[in-house]
Image: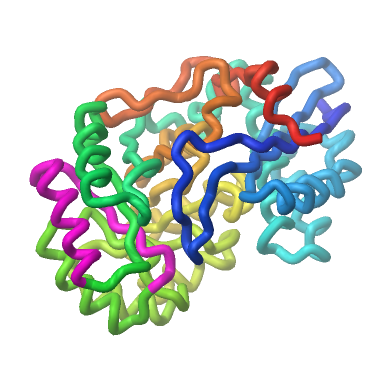
């Protein structure tokens, strides 16, 4: 079964609640690029990459379109061959940034095609370890929220059934940051997990000092604390703190993750589907982590990542970030802190043609 057609569609999807991202970037829109593949028999599936900013998305789409000649005629069941071809073809782009994003989106679409062709959910094709995965709320509690907004949103997430949620830090004095987590802890009680995402803002000494203060609030994990994002520096932090340190979302492919494992730089690996290198490489990284007895958490892409997390024994928790839910007829939903894997072939989600038309960039 071979690929006959490949098309890409760049979208601009408005966020329901704009937020302040790292480097003081105010995000109002998200820009997915759909990669749609069709076999000679008429079977269709899609993958996805994304960026932020209506101008940046043009470069991402161009990077994907550059690989079309590699994809056409590819046997969908020869996934190792396909990945190696894409890896070689993106060497000139570099195996970070849009080059790896493009590879990942195509690789993911190929895996969804395989699952559809075999009439099984992607999670089952990849391993089928479980049928639902725990999920945490990552779409609220940002830096620009007031104390009142933090408490109201945190309480509402508990009412929705979330047992774990993430809040952001990194742009305020230590005293203010501690007041903010105190407010969230008071709003949700002691039984709810609170993650802290610093988004690469602190030094090693700042992180260790703040880490010891944060441990009083029973933090679920401390994520990406260091401005350096260096494996050696992360190892210093991980060894100094009692709370779990989570890192990895900016690291690409298995070669990038290797030093994190060797240096014991994190207690939990966060693996991003599009930076990792698609489904093929994500699964290899998860297996590497398993060999070091480390759990894996997903980064973004809950629509695809739920299948990956359900396929592996060392999957810890899924990041629920519903940025582009609007493109689906029935997007994945969290119920009582879990997402149930659709019992349908492939991804199990159907695109909404009207939404695609509405958000498509001209």
Residue 196 picture location, percent across and down = 29, 58
For residue 112, say whether it is visible. yes
Residue 97 picture location, percent across and down = 67, 60
Image quarter (top left, top right, bottom left or bottom right) of the N terminus = top right
Q: Residue at x 43, y 73 (%)?
A: 262
Residue 14 picture location, percent across and down = 57, 36
- For residue 197, what is the image quadrant? bottom left
Q: Residue at x 14, y 43 (%)?
A: 187
Residue 310 picture location, percent across and down = 41, 34
Q: Residue at x 29, y 62 (%)?
A: 222
Colour scheme in the image? Answer: rainbow
Q: How many labels does the image show?
A: 0
Q: Residue at x 35, y 67 (%)?
A: 170
- Any magenta on residue 193? yes
- On screen, residue 54 above or below 155: below
Is 49 or 306 nearer to us in this picture? Answer: 49
Is 245 or 322 nearer to us in this picture? Answer: 322
- On screen, residue 333 above or below 215: above
Per the rendered image, the range of residues in magenta is 175-201
- On screen, residue 289 above or below 306: below
Is 104 or 152 nearer to us in this picture? Answer: 152
Query: Does residue 167 appear left or right of residue 25 in this picture?
Result: left
For residue 81, say whether it is visible. no
Query: Does residue 242 appear left or right of residue 103 in this picture?
Result: left
């Amino acid at each position: 079964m071979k690929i006959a057609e490949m098309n890409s569609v760049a979208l601009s999807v408005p966020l329901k609640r704009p937020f302040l991202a790292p480097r003081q970037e105010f995000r109002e829109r998200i820009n997915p690029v759909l990669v749609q593949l069709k076999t000679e028999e008429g079977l269709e599936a899609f993958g996805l990459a994304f960026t932020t900013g209506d101008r940046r998305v043009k470069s991402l789409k161009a990077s994907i379109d550059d690989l079309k000649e590699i994809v056409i005629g590819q046997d969908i069941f020869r996934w190792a061959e396909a990945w190696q071809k894409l890896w070689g073809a993106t060497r000139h782009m570099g195996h970070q940034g849009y080059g790896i994003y493009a590879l990942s989106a195509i690789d993911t679409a190929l895996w969804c095609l395989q699952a559809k062709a075999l009439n099984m959910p992607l999670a089952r094709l990849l391993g089928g370890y479980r049928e639902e995965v725990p999920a945490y709320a990552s779409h609220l509690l940002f830096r620009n929220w007031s104390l009142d907004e933090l408490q109201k949103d945190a309480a509402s997430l508990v009412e929705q059934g979330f047992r774990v949620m993430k809040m952001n830090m990194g742009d305020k004095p230590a005293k203010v940051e501690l007041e903010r987590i105190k407010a969230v802890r008071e709003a949700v009680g002691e039984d709810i997990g609170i993650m802290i995402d610093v988004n690469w803002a602190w030094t090693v000494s700042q992180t260790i000092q703040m880490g010891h203060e944060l441990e009083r609030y029973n933090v679920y994990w401390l994520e990406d604390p260091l401005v350096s994002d260096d494996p050696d520096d992360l190892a210093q932090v991980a060894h100094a703190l009692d709370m779990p340190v989570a890192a990895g979302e900016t690291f690409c492919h298995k070669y990038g993750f290797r030093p994190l494992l060797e240096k014991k730089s994190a207690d939990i690996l966060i693996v991003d589907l599009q930076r990792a290198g698609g489904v093929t490489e994500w699964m290899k990284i998860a297996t590497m982590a398993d060999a070091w007895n480390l759990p894996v958490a997903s980064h973004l892409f809950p629509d695809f990542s739920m299948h990956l997390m359900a396929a592996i024994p060392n999957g810890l928790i899924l990041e629920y970030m519903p940025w582009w839910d609007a493109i689906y007829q029935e997007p994945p939903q969290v119920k009582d802190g879990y997402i149930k894997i659709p019992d349908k072939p492939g991804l199990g989600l159907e695109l909404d043609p009207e939404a695609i038309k509405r958000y498509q960039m001209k």
